[in-house]
Image: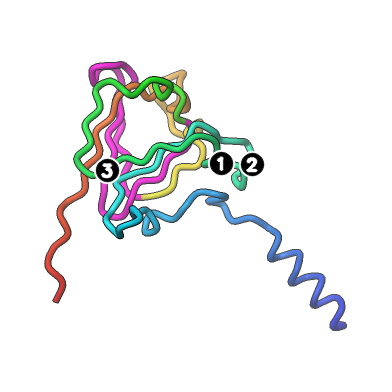
Amino acid sequence: MSPLCSLLLGLALAAVPGVRGACPQPADLKNANGTRTCAKLYDKSDPYYERCCGGAEMSVQPGTDLPYLPSGWRNVISSLVVGQRCELVVWSSRGKSGKTRKFSSGTYPRLEEYRRGIFGDWSNSISSLYCRCPPAGPRP
């Protein structure tokens, strides 16, 4: 293979986005002071993964219990990332009622891919949440 073909192939492969797109890795969810963030919620997703986890962003700290989401966040969350060793529990109705789902540590760029009942999905369907992370144990 000629050097030019190798270079073009390398550039083409570098330009191909990963499946997680613009979403951060769960291990990267930290506050400026280095403390853990339980989850990050986003109001934009896209059929193209590289455009997911965009728009407005809300950081959720460990132990956050929101039976009523803040103004402008009810039923608009379409991408989310849950930090390492954390769990995000969501409900489809305010006051922690309706359908529920647990999201464990990971990246969820398109909530359209996660079923909510027979006919629905979780994109633009989250009305309340609880996020928890076990306390970090002592380091040896």
Q: Magenta segment, which residues? A: 78-105
Give the residue drawn at x 23%, y 17%.
Answer: 95
Q: Amino acid at mark 3?
A: Gln
**Amino acid identity at mark 2:** Tyr
Q: How many marks?
A: 3
- Residue located beneath label 2 in the image: 48
Q: Which residue sits at x=49%, y=34%?
A: 56
Circle 1 residues within 10 Å: few <14, some 14–19, many ≥20: many
Disc 3 from disc 2: Cα separation: 28 Å
Outermost residue toward the front?
Answer: 33
Q: Where residue 50 sits: x, y (%)?
A: 61, 47
Query: Which residue bears the numbered disc 1?
Result: 52
Give the residue pinned by disc 3: 61
Where the C terminus falls, by quadrant? Answer: bottom left
Which of the two discs, 3 and 2, labels the residue nearer the N terminus? 2
Do labels 3 and 1 touch, CB within 8 Å? no
Residue contact between numbered discs 2 and 1, judged by CB atoms under 8 Å? yes
